[in-house]
Image (cartoon, rainbow, N blue to C red):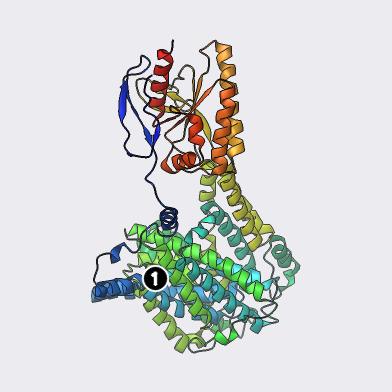
């Protein structure tokens, strides 16, 4: 060929084309491969940071607006209540009152129960169901998220703090550490939202969380056997063997009255939940069941207290609003590191649950939840909560589901729920004196048993074995080692999976689909045919320092195997290797060096290396590193089809 059109050009960006007729393929236009527009380093950095931290471009609404409109939009951006507040009406209020009172009937017994799960005084659970929902109603962007204590965060906080401090022997210190951990959880959550670093929580994969929740749920259920069996002395450890040995070592403390009552209410709670699942219109049956159980069991124990003193009760709960607790925050001492670690771990877990729940119900109603706003809202409500006798709170899936089914329209349902809790704190606390601990255990068991998703684990096994391994590591780590270590092991397995995909990227041999210019995996498409004298390879990953050695060795192995196959079948000699770089989204200096070395190695074996369809950033790196110079004028093509047609024509033109 006299002129080759596949040179790399800076300008213009749209290269010229020529038509080359070949016998192997129909006439095909050969396009030049161009570099991306020139940009300064500052422009590249600005664009990259914008893609990382502002993929949604949150400031686009402020363009070309007056200062007053910008002020109004700013208030709506930081305080979503200004967005929906002006359009609020009596019809919406009616729906929110019904849903708010419905979730309050669930939140009150769950608040008391989850506080016990965290080894905190029951009243703290009610405090945590009052202040945080009010703060979220101003800052949150989800209309259906019901805020309050949740089982997983309560379990993790209780297990981590109990390893170092006893809640019975040092109750004040334990309470200080719980409030301090809540403060650090809020600071961590709000920082993620403010700095738009929400992608950090994505390292907790769904597979990891499925296993973690299942393992934690089993531990929670076993821990509640203390209340179901009436055991007084029980281990504070959260490992499977410790809990089981404590159950059987204290058989003398078992109370048959407690066991009978617990079994009856467990059957009642599970039955109501089954009814609500099979008939969604009867959602209120499961929602009202916990409070109904508390009322009935309290009345029973009140009348039978003189005859059956063996059933333990909650006892005295103080009346009144949340007392300030800012003076109890623990910022100096030997347990500060424990409070920080507990806060970060519970903060990650509660944030993951809250954002996931909010997005789930937003998708059902076709509106959008801003993840960064949610992080800031959850973080700020936990910071304020730590100063008002609350512990870690977030959006609860069970309460949010009830809120959604009850017809909630806005976050005013959280305000109604908080008002119901306020009435309870001011006037109804003496009524809980005779509430038996066994009913709290039954409520917790019913709630957390729904977190054991064996069907999801089975799907993981069917779809991705590595995800299933991460799930099982998380499950058994939590069950037999400890809650934080189990979570760390599972996160480690997930990160290992990422590293495995990066360091061992997928490569494949491509063939031509007859009568088309399409090239696909030979193993996947049986009709795909090899092109004589060509070996067409595809790489499906960025080329980084971590995988360059592997890719070089794997490509050379493909070449060796192809030469052996050709020799065995007496086909045309291998002359050219085409590397399809469509899926190579990025390359670093190690990658460009590898391409240069690979080109030299193949040249020594009289084999031509050609690149097809490298993306703009890859082209730019190859040019800046002078690697493109080693490929020559006809070393880079826009598509595999053009490369095959052009190179075949060049071979035919040679004498």
Q: Is residue 434 above or below residue 253?
A: below
Quadrant hosting residue 80? bottom left
Quadrant hosting residue 253? bottom right
Q: Residue at x 51, y 19 (%)?
A: 575
The C terminus lies in which quarter of the figure? top left
Q: Is residue 512 above or below residue 16?
A: above
Residue 382 is left or right of residue 102, and the answer is right
Q: Is residue 506 above or below residue 142?
A: above
Q: Is residue 291 visible?
A: no
Q: Which residue is mark 1?
A: 140
Where does the image place residue 280, in percent across and percent down from the top left?
37, 60
Q: Residue at x 54, y 68 (%)?
A: 347
Q: Is residue 491 visible?
A: yes
Q: Residue at x 51, y 45 (%)?
A: 459
Where does the image place residue 590, in percent across and percent down from the top left?
57, 42
Quadrant hosting residue 373? bottom left
Give 507 or 295, whichever is nearer the viewer: 507
Give 448 or 302, whichever is nearer the viewer: 448
Give 230 or 392, whichever is nearer the viewer: 392
Mark 1: give few (<14), some (14-19) or many (20+) Cα within 10 Å.
many
Give SS at disc 1: loop
Q: Is residue 511 above or below residue 590?
A: above
Give 332 or 411, whichever is nearer the viewer: 332
Residue placed farthest to the right in the image?
249
Q: Residue at x 32, y 60 (%)?
A: 365
Where does the image place residue 10, in percent across and percent down from the top left?
38, 39
The N terminus lies in which quarter of the figure? top left
- Looking at the rendered structure, the number of numbered marks drawn on it comes to 1
Where does the image place residue 275, in percent across and percent down from the top left?
42, 60
């Amino acid at each position: 060929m006299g002129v080759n059109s596949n040179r790399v050009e800076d300008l213009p960006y749209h290269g010229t084309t020529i038509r080359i007729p070949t016998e192997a393929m129909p006439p095909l236009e050969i396009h030049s491969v161009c570099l991306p527009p020139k940009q300064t380093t500052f422009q590249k950095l600005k664009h990259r940071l914008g893609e990382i931290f502002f993929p949604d471009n949150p400031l686009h609404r402020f363009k070309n607006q007056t200062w007053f409109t910008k002020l109004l939009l700013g208030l709506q951006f930081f305080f979503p209540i200004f967005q929906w507040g002006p359009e609020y009406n009596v019809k919406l209020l009616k729906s929110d009152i019904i849903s708010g009172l419905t979730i309050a009937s669930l939140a009150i017994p769950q608040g008391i129960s989850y506080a016990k799960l965290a080894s905190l005084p029951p009243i703290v659970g009610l405090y945590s169901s009052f202040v945080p929902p009010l703060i979220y109603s101003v800052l949150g962007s989800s209309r259906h998220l019901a805020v309050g204590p949740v089982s997983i965060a309560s379990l993790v906080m209780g297990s981590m703090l109990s390893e170092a401090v006893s809640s019975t022997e040092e109750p004040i210190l334990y309470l200080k550490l719980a409030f301090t951990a809540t403060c650090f959880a809020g600071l961590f959550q709000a920082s993620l939202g403010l700095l738009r670093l929400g992608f950090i929580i994505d390292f907790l994969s769904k597979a990891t969380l499925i296993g973690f929740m299942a393992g934690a749920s089993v531990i929670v259920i076993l821990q509640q056997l203390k209340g179901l069996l009436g055991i007084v002395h029980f281990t504070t450890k959260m490992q499977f063997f410790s809990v089981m040995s404590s159950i059987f070592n204290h058989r003398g403390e078992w109370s048959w009255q407690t066991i009978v009552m617990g079994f009856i209410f467990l059957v009642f709670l599970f039955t109501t939940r089954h009814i609500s699942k099979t008939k969604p219109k009867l959602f209120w049956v499961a929602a009202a069941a916990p409070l109904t159980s508390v009322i009935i069991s309290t009345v029973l124990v009140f009348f039978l207290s003189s005859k059956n003193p063996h059933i333990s009760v909650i006892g005295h709960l103080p009346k009144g609003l949340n007392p300030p607790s800012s003076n109890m925050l623990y910022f100096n001492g030997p347990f500060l590191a424990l409070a920080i670690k507990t806060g970060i771990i519970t903060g990650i877990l509660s944030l993951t649950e809250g954002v996931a729940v909010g997005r789930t119900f937003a998708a059902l109603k076709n509106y959008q939840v801003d993840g960064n706003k949610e992080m800031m809202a959850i973080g700020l409500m936990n910071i304020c909560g730590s100063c008002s006798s609350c512990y870690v709170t977030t959006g609860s899936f069970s309460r949010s589901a009830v809120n959604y089914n009850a017809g909630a329209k806005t976050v005013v349902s959280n305000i109604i729920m908080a008002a119901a809790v306020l009435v309870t704190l001011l006037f109804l606390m003496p009524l809980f004196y005779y509430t038996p601990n066994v009913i709290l255990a039954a409520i917790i068991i019913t709630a957390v048993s729904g977190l054991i998703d064996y069907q999801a684990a089975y799907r993981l096994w069917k779809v991705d074995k590595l995800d299933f391994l991460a799930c099982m590591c998380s499950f058994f780590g939590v069950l037999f080692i400890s809650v934080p270590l189990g979570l760390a092991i599972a996160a480690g397995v997930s990160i290992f999976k990422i590293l495995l995909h990066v360091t061992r990227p997928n490569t494949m041999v491509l063939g031509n689909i007859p009568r088309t210019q399409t090239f696909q995996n030979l193993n996947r498409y049986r009709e795909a045919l090899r092109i004589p004298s060509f070996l067409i390879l595809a790489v499906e990953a960025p080329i980084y320092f971590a995988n360059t050695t592997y890719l070089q060795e794997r490509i050379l192995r493909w070449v060796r195997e192809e030469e052996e196959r050709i020799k065995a079948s007496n086909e045309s000699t291998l002359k050219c290797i085409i590397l399809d770089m469509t899926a190579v989204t990025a390359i670093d200096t190690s990658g460009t060096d590898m391409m240069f070395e690979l080109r030299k190695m193949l040249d020594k074996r009289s084999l031509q290396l050609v690149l097809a369809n490298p993306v703009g950033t890859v082209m730019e790196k190859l040019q800046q590193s002078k690697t493109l110079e080693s490929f020559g004028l006809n070393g880079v093509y826009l598509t595999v089809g053009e490369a095959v047609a052009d190179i075949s024509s060049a071979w035919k033109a040679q004498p």
